[in-house]
Amino acid sequence: MNIGIIGLGLMGGSLGLVLKKYPQKYHIIGYDHNKTHQKEAMELNLIDELYDDFEDIKKCAVIILTIPVDAIITTIKRLKDAPKNCTIIDFGSSKSKISNSIPKDIRELVVTAHPMTGTEKFGPTAAIDNLYKDKVMVVCDKEKSGKLQRDTAIGIFRDIDAKIVFMEANEHDRHAAFISHMPHAVSFAIANSVMKQEDAGNIIALAGGGFKSMSRIAKSSPNMWEDIFRQNRENLLESIEAFNSEIMLCKKMIEDENWEELHKWMLDANSLHDIL
C-alpha cells in the first residue's frame, strides 16, 4: 500500500519512521514544499521515496496530511479529484473547521483525526519512532467517512500503537482548547512575562526545572499555533477566561493573605494528578 505523507516535519517524519517498520505492508512516499525538509527526510530515512509533483501524490492509496491546520483545508480542496477508493487522513489539532470545509463530493474519503502527542520541536530532525505509541488518536465525525476509509485509517492507527477514541469534532475542539490549546497560550504568556522583566543572565542563573517545564512548549512553532488559535478561537477564548478567573482568584487570596483558602485551592489542583 502506497502511503503519501504530505508534510515531513515532526508529525509526518515520525509517522513515516514507524510505518517503515512494515516494509511488506506499506511503501512510504513523502511530499513537502520545503526543499530542506525533503533532503533531511531522505537522509534520515524517514520515507522510502520523495515526490515533487503534487499530482503524483494523488495516486497513493492513502494520503495523510501532517501540515498546519489552515494548509490542511487548502490541501484537501486540491484533492477533490482523488480516486473514490482513496483514503485521506488529516492530523490537524483543531477539527470542526476542517471537517466542515471538506468538499461534499469527497467527504466520505476523508478521516479527520488528531493524535494527542507532539513535542516543542519541529522539522524532520525532530522525528522520533515512538511518538504515537500508546498516545490517544481522536477520530472525529466518523459517520461522515466511508467504511473503507474508516477501516483503513483505524488499521494504520493500530499499527502505530495509538489508542483510538471517537468524538464529534465540536466536542473535540472544546476539550482540546482546555487541555492543549490554552496551556500553549499560558506557556507563551509565561515566557513573555519573564522575558519582559528579567535579563538573560538572571534567567539562566535562576530558572529551575519548574520554569523550564512550564515554558518548554513556548518553543513551539508560532506559524502552526497561530493557525490553531485562529481556527479554535471561540473555545480558546472560553478556556483562557476560565484560566484567568483562577489566576485572579489566586491573586486575591494572596492580596487578602487568605492562606488557608489558598492552601485548599492548591490541594484541589493536586487532585488533577489522581486522574492523570
Image: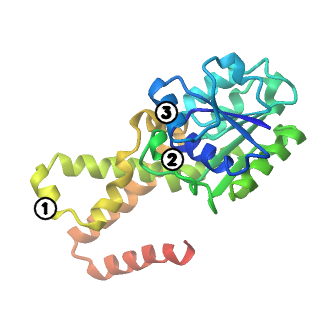
The residue singled out by tag 2 in the image is 127
* Discs 3, 2 touching: Cβ within 8 Å: no
Residue toward you, 202 or 15: 15
The residue singled out by tag 1 in the image is 205
Q: Residue at x 42, y 49 (%)?
A: 120
Q: Earlier in the sequence, mark 3 or mark 1?
A: 1
Residues packed near mark 1 inside 10 Å, few (<14), some (14 to 19) or many (20 plus): few
Q: Dot 3 lies on which element? A: helix
Q: Is residue 198 visible?
A: no
* Discs 1, 2 touching: Cβ within 8 Å: no
Quadrant, the C terminus: bottom right
For the residue marked with disc 2, what is the amino acid?
Ala
The residue singled out by tag 3 in the image is 227
Give how far across and how far down residue 127 sits, in percent: 51, 47
Q: Is residue 73 visible?
A: yes
Give how far across and how far down residue 57 sits, in percent: 70, 24
Whether residue 25 is situated above or below residue 204 in the rendered picture: above
